[in-house]
Image: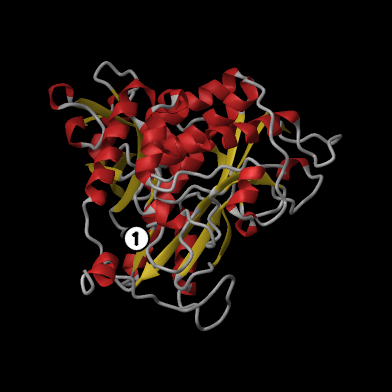
Amino acid sequence: MAKRTKEEILKLVKENDVKFIRLWFTDVMGQVKSFSITDEELEGALENGMGFDGSSITGYQDIEESDMIAMPDPDTFVILPWRPKEKAVARMICDILTPDKTPYEGDPRYVLKRALKRAKDMGFDHFYLGPELEFFYFKSDGGTDILDKGGYFDLTTLDVASDLRRETVLALESMGVQIEYSHHEVAPSQHEVDMKYKDALMMADNVITYKVTVKEIASKFGVYATFMPKPIFGQNGSGMHTHQSLFKGNKNMFFDAKSKDNLSEIARSYIAGLLKHSQEICAIFAQTTNSYKRLVPGYEAPVYIAWSRRNRSALVRVPHYYPGKEQATRCEFRACDPACNPYLTFAAMLHAGLDGIEKNYKVPAPMEQNLYHLTDAERKEKNIETLPDSLGQAIAIAEKSALVKKVLGEHIFPRFIELKRKEWDDYKVQVPQCELDKYLSIL
């Protein structure tokens, strides 16, 4: 697909009465950062980027070397549908550069670009992804008062968020994000809008667009949307199951018509890589202390490191909706949650899978039985390990991982570890209400 030119962007701005352009990028944790320029500044920004202070961005530069440049990517130009049409507002996602115009090692988008280059060098033209982001609607950001008591796929008056989802889908489609499904999820007031699969970089851009859009439309309706992994005790948390495949041109390298299950040796080695390195990259795809309240048995969140052709209790699943169809052959990694940084998470999964291919990892036998029903002894007998059960444990494993260091790079790796360790240390000293309820009156 041809890249948009500067002239095309300037023409779009004029034709659509765009006055303000928001420049978006993320910090290391995945929080969207933004500043606005006017249409008069756009031509210069497209040529030379816009300078900003990187020392104020989490995980970026130290104060003595803080000058950064945000270089807008013309292919990410969209008009924000929730803003007025007169003197409209557009947005562009930026690559972060150093003052000498080289890619900044601390830019999460660049981390994903590096991973995609490795895939390209190994002969893979496309890393296609289809993440499924779940989220909750609450009455405000001050608590967890739900809007409905609906359940999975419910189509009843219980699902009062249908209009919210409708407006969200329309907004996303107006920004070029293709949508496949939208529906109520398992927990009360929990929802999902699924995007059509895309190349990894575009999909990571779409994920941050999706999260901003869901929140903006919710705010327009006077409610609050959250991607917190586990906001309600005793209910399912919100995941980001991520379907993935590698293509060479139009050929799906995960597909083998001669194989009994249509999975190629490349797919098997890729899956083996995801399984082998899942503990190491867990701190990236489940990066908050709250993430580990979701990753517990019994709530459809996989914690056991195994794969299956259909079994949703396994960490990696191979969907069989369309058996024998080449384009649909893929694997689904089920442990990610939507609080992660998509650029880092997609890069981590890709590197893990590529290691499996490059080093010819052998995938274990698939586990088709419900892993939650096995005893600890039975899982031990089958050599089924588990994901870390806390952010502290995940960080301890990531810190020793050569793969995580390769994923994040020399700049981000120590900063990421430091930030996450501080988050864990802050969490450990808290006194939660459940401890007060249990101990205060008896000790």
At a point 54% along the width and 30% down the height, the residue shown is: 352
* Residue 179, picture quadrant: bottom right
Q: Is residue 294 left or right of residue 270?
A: left
In the foreground, 110 or 15: 110
Q: Quadrant of the C terminus?
A: bottom left
At a point 59% along the width and 26% down the height, the residue shown is: 354
At a point 46% along the width and 46% down the height, the residue shown is: 206
* Residue farthest left in this picture: 64
Looking at the picture, how far across and down is residue 213, in whole percent? 39, 56
Q: Is residue 238 visible?
A: yes
Amino acid of disc 1: Glu
Estimate how packed mark 1 is, as few (under 14), some (14 to 19) or many (20 or more) residues with alpha carbons within 10 Å: many
* Residue farthest bottom in this picture: 157
Judging by the rendered image, the residue that carries numbered circle 1 is: 216
The image shows residue 117, relative to residue 323, as above or below, that is: above
**Dot 1: what SS?**
helix
